[in-house]
Amino acid sequence: MDDELDELFRNAHFDEDRVIFCGIVRAPQSVLENFAKQTGQAISFVADPDGMISRSFGAADKPRLFVLDPMLRAVANIPWDESGAHIKTACELIRGLPDVDNSAGVPLTAPVLIVPRVLDFPLCETLVRVFGEVGGEDSGFLVDVDGKTARMIDHRLKCRSDLVVVHPV
């Protein structure tokens, strides 16, 4: 397994600003010292002596490689196989990942919350159409006034309209 990890680390180009690796090792903490030469800013290991973490990811019997996006959603679940093809698959996948700022399919910019691919396209189109037809209510924003939370509307600072949509029961 050490040779495979070395190959992965050589070819996947882990970088703390783009792609990091966290290995879960089914062994006591003391065994992690064996991985010290590979550990760095973008590569770390966590001990899982009782196998609880491994079991929760379906990797109790056989190691797996999981690739997560910046929102910690699984992009890939690659079983560790005897032929070593999993390393090539993981490296190709990692090299093909979009930049972190474009991982949602659009540039991520604060303070907008972007949660891509949660709602299907027909529902999104319906919500946009309903908002266009009905409009929203000027909802303002929350501020602290004398230690209490108050709603404020000040279009010089922020302009926001909300529309409450209720699904009939």
Image (cartoon, helix red, strand yellow):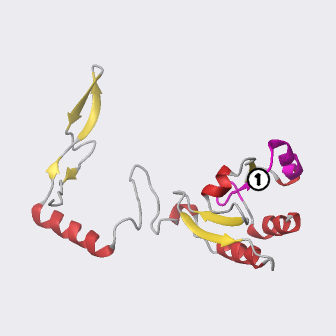
Expressed as whole percent of the image width and height from the top left, the position of residue 108 reads 46, 59
Nearer to the camera, 159 or 66: 66
9 left or right of 55?
right
Q: In the rendered image, which quarter is residue 131 located in?
A: bottom left
Expressed as whole percent of the image width and height from the top left, the position of residue 48 reads 73, 48
Query: Which residue has dot 1 on it?
Result: 26
Q: Quadrant of the N terminus?
A: bottom right
* Furthest residue in direction left, as rendered: 134
Q: Does residue 42 lie above or below 141 as drawn?
A: below
Please tell me which residue is depicted at 38% across the width and 65% down the height of the picture: 118
Residue 22 visible in this rendered orientation of the protein: yes
Please tell me which residue is depicted at 56% across the width and 64% down the height of the picture: 74
Q: In the rendered image, which quarter is residue 136 located in?
A: bottom left
- Say few, some or many: other residues with alpha carbon within 10 Å of mark 1 (under 14 / 14 to 19 / 20 or more): many
Q: In the rendered image, which quarter is residue 82 located in?
A: bottom right
Nearer to the camera, 21 or 156: 21
